[in-house]
């Protein structure tokens, strides 16, 4: 009996899942906190620069050991471009809406990821015949519409801008996931992420120079700088890699289901820190959205078992 349980529970993978959830729950809170000190362009550049420096020794070691083929740098261009756009939108959204609301709407990315997968991956087209898939898609769309519609200040111009940013950000996240999956199919996730981070920092620096005010960071106190470092190391540098580690050890389904708790962990923290609130109807439709995501993940896993 003990042997069976030992095989069923992967302690390291479980730790990776929970750690990813913690990292990605802390990130949005710190991004929201930094909105009072610097613009989104500057924040993006600083946070990703720290994350890039975190993995730079590993990248240099890989280059020195000839673990990186030249073609990987070319393959990384498209996912890096998608990541630059996604990161720019992700941080900008927190300047218009609350942290929990932004994270909740971002979960609509499952709709776009599924749509792209049906187009580009022949082995996933069997989802079209899955009732779970269509039920999940219906739930997800209904949830997104409900969360947005029942926002108390929905008619305010700032809120509408934030909603548009959040929805487009979800689309760009799906594009990033798809392109990264194609580009780094047989590549160590740490190497792939390190290469993308170099391109991303370069792009965010250009955006910061053109649209931001990078000199603002010189006037920041200690705590904003601490927030930048912590959010960069946890939410960007470690969060992504821990998530990939969990997926490699126990598959994509369990980690994806664990991360569905993110909007509610963010909401719990944001309610205490910023006084953010979601109406009863928003919470209800938020659960519908997450249920839809869970159904989509379930359908995908069922497809893999039958293939």
Image (spheres, grey):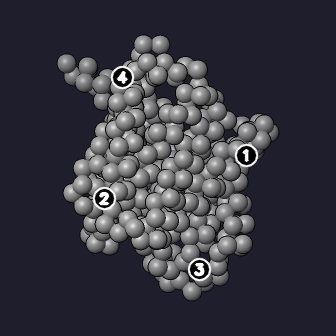
- Asked if residue 50 can be seen in this view, the reply is no
How much space separates mark 2 and mark 4, taking CA atoms? Answer: 28 Å
- The residue that mark 4 highlights is 131
Furthest-top residue in this view:
306
How much space separates mark 3 and mark 2, taking CA atoms? Answer: 37 Å
Report if the CB atoms under discs 1 and 2 are less than 8 Å apart.
no
On residue 77, the disc is 1
Instruction: Answer with mark 3 or mark 2, whichever residue precedes in sequence.
Output: 2
Q: Nearer the viewer, mark 1 or mark 4?
A: 4
Q: Nearer the viewer, mark 1 or mark 2?
A: 2
Instruction: Answer with mark 2 or mark 4, whichever residue precedes in sequence.
Output: 4
How much space separates mark 4 and mark 3, taking CA atoms? Answer: 51 Å
Q: Is residue 295 left or right of residue 158?
A: left
Furthest-front residue in this view:
155
Q: Is residue 112 left or right of residue 60?
A: left
Task: Tell me the residue at 37%/36% (across/down).
Answer: 138
Q: Position of residue 197 (x, y in %)?
A: 64, 53
Q: Quadrant of the N terminus?
A: top left
Q: Secondary structure at mark 4?
A: helix
Q: Secondary structure at mark 1?
A: helix
How much space separates mark 1 and mark 4, taking CA atoms? Answer: 36 Å
Q: Residues within 10 Å of mark 2 (few under 14, many from 20)?
A: some
Task: Tell me the residue at 24%/55% (across/down).
Answer: 281
Instruction: Answer with mark 1 or mark 4, whichever residue precedes in sequence.
Output: 1
- The residue that mark 3 highlights is 217
- Asked if residue 252 can be seen in this view, the reply is yes
Q: Nearer the viewer, mark 3 or mark 1?
A: 1
- The residue that mark 2 highlights is 150
């Amino acid at each position: 009996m003990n042997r069976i349980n030992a095989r069923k529970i992967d302690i390291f993978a479980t730790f990776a899942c929970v750690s990813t959830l913690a990292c990605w729950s802390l990130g949005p809170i710190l991004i929201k906190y930094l909105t009072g000190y610097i613009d989104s362009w500057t924040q993006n550049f600083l946070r990703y620069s720290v994350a890039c420096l975190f993995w730079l020794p590993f990248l240099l070691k890989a280059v020195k050991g000839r673990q990186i083929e030249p073609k990987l740098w070319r393959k990384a261009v498209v996912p890096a471009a998608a990541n630059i756009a996604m990161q720019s939108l992700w941080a900008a959204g927190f300047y218009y809406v609350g942290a929990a609301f932004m994270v909740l709407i971002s979960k609509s990315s499952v709709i776009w990821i599924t749509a792209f997968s049906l187009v580009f991956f022949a082995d996933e087209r069997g989802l079209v015949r899955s009732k779970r898939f269509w039920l999940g898609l219906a739930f997800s769309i209904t949830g997104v519409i409900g969360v947005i519609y029942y926002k108390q200040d929905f008619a305010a111009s700032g809120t509408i801008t934030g909603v548009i940013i959040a929805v487009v950000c979800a689309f760009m996240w799906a594009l990033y996931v798809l392109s990264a999956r194609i580009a780094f199919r047989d590549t160590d996730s740490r190497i792939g992420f390190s290469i993308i981070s170099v391109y991303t920092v370069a792009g965010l620096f250009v955006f910061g120079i053109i649209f931001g005010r990078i000199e603002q960071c010189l006037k920041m106190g200690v705590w904003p700088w601490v927030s930048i470092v912590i959010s960069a190391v946890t939410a960007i540098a470690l969060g992504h890699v821990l998530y990939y580690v969990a997926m490699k050890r126990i598959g994509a389904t369990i980690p994806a289901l664990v991360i569905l708790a993110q909007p509610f962990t963010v909401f719990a923290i944001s309610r205490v820190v910023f006084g953010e609130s979601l109406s009863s109807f928003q919470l209800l439709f938020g659960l519908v959205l997450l249920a839809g995501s869970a159904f989509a993940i379930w359908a995908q896993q069922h497809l893999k078992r039958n293939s």
